[in-house]
Amino acid sequence: MTTNLQDRWSSWLIERNRRGMRFVLIITLALYPAFGVLDYLLAPRDALPILYGTRLLVAVTTLALFGVIQRPLFARHFNLISSTYILLAASGISVMTVFMGGLESSYYAGLSLVIVGTGLLFVWPMHVVLAVHVLILLSFLVPNLLLAHVGNRVDALSNLAFLMATAIITGTGQIVLFGSQRKQIVDQIALEETKASLEKAHDELKQLDSFKSQLFANITHEFKTPLAMVLAPLELMLQGEMGPLSTAQQTTFQSMFRSGLKLLKMIGDLLDLSRLEESKLRLKVAEQDLGEYLRGLVAQVQPLAERKGIELQLLAGAERSVVWCDIERLERVFLNLLSNATKFTPPGGHIKVALLDLGTTVQVVVQDDGPGFPPDKAEQIFERFYQVDMGGTRRYGGTGIGLALAKEIVELHGGNIRAESAGGARFTVELIKDRDHFRLEVLERRGPSRDVPAGSRANDRGLMDFAVQMAARDEYRLLDIAEATERRVSLRDIDEHLRPHVALVVDDTPDIIRLVHTSLRSHFKVISAEDGLKGLEMALKERPSLIVADLMMPGIDGLELTRRLRASEETRHIPILMLTAKGDLDARVLGLETGVNAYLAKPSRRASC
């Protein structure tokens, strides 16, 4: 038993028995003198002095104990004081039985009342319970036997049997109560300690989470400087500021620049997620015509969609639809929805953007006729880093940040976003049109307070900030859509027919295909396929001298492609290099057992076998 348990248990017993003692004293003081009337009416006259003396002794003791129970003496000896007083009261009743019928006296019922009252009002350990009840029985039995005041033996035995039964039942109840109350205290202490541990762990987790978010924000923010030092010279080279470039160099630098922009965009998304988590993302709220804005945005996206053969259509129910919002933040939402739509919609498909003015609210609906998603994932797709195709044969890339960020931004505006899947994906963004819902007290009722000033953001550094400059450029804003609709994988070399060998590159990332093409073009005619099934078809048709395949890709992954190539007499001899960003040794061992000749770690050119 711990010190804390001992202290709590002792304190509880003291208070519980102090209350019980107080009730016993009050009851005794009220009833004991009343029995003096019975003494006068029923007891022999020569016994009255003894009986009244007993009554007086009990009454004086009772009055004295009213003061004792409030003192430290009672706290130190509460079991002894309470049990001794009960024995005194019981002995007074036993004295009555000696003069009023002995063992057959009906006054034994008074002892039964004392025993029952003791069980109801006091919580004692077993040894005290046994001692008190045995001594009460002896106070009744011994004096009457010594004085031979037995009376009718049948009545005497009956009284004694009932008194003993009452003592046994009441004593058993007291012993059980003592154990159950102690267990309750133990459980309560354990619960409090568990609660304290959980609260401490919760506070530590909150501090750790805050530290993680701050560290994450600091690190990603610091990424911008070296990335700017990469992108800025690349842009100067592409603009011809550092001399003329060959076609191959131009293509390579453009791919590098585009990949750098993509990385910068991902850093921006992660920073915004971090700010949202810390409730530090600020809105620049102004009155905007959402209809005019969407017409301009759709006009910019339309040429990109047409590259993939997708028909993009805007359906606006009203010429003007004025909404108070941060249009720059909401553009992230709409571009993400359009990016997903162009990514998942097959060539020849359709995308519809609808603007519905509902009076106090406005809805923007983006619907495509792509494969959609499982209906039971309608909520899950808005979770951070979640993607529907998270397996080894992912057909579509992405980080799983876009929809989570879109949801956070829409809800920061007091609106909501929902997804449906039936004949394609349908996303609906609903926004409140007026400005009143941006009042801070309203935002505080929704959750953590957001600072919503009418001016510029505190973290903006003007046009001198490289990331801010890039964010305003169309090639940055529309980067995801441009990548989703990109159809040109690599340039065809004029003299490629003179190359003695053919290399097949199977990868779902155009930039990787272009990189491999640049590396192999000196010795190979390079052809490509965007997924495993098409790669298998082209390998059987073209019989290349070398196959470079990605480990993770749609259709069938690199390992399954290797198995099928090795199973065919026509292709089993072709060397296969596997591209992978994974460092999983087991996967590499499995690949080598399947028939992979060597691994190439993305984007390194060094093979590992």
Image (spheres, rainbow, N blue to C red):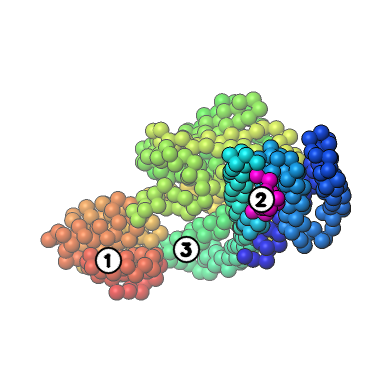
Rendered view: 406 above or below 556: above
What amino acid is labelled 3 in the image?
Met
Give above or below for 325 relative to 541: above
Label of residue 256 in the image? 3
Q: Position of residue 473 (x, y in %)?
A: 58, 52
Q: Main secondary structure of the magenta part?
A: helix
Asked if the residue at tag 1 contacts the one at tag 2, i.e. Cβ–Cβ closer than 8 Å, the answer is: no
Locate residue 190, reporting x and y percent.
Answer: 61, 57
Residue at the spot x=33%, y=73% of the render?
A: 607
- Residue corresponding to mark 2: 145
The circle drawn on residue 590 is 1
Residue displayed at 49% across by 37% down:
419
Out of 417 and 494, give the one closest to the viewer. 417
**Residue stretch rendered in magenta on the structure:** 132-150
Mark nearer the viewer, 3 or 1 = 1
Q: Which of disc 1 and disc 2 is earlier in sequence?
A: 2
**Secondary structure under badge 1?**
helix
* Pick the front one: 542 or 75: 75
Q: CA distance from mark 2 to mark 1?
A: 97 Å
Q: In this picture, is 285 found above or below 521? A: above
Q: Check whether the beta carbons of the residues at disc 3 and disc 1 lie within 8 A of each other.
A: no
Q: Nearer the viewer, mark 3 or mark 2?
A: 2
* In front of the other: 381 or 30: 30
- For mark 2, give the secondary structure: helix
Name the kind of residue labelled 1 in the image: Leu
Q: From where the camera sits, is residue 162 visible? A: no
Residue 166 magenta-highlighted: no
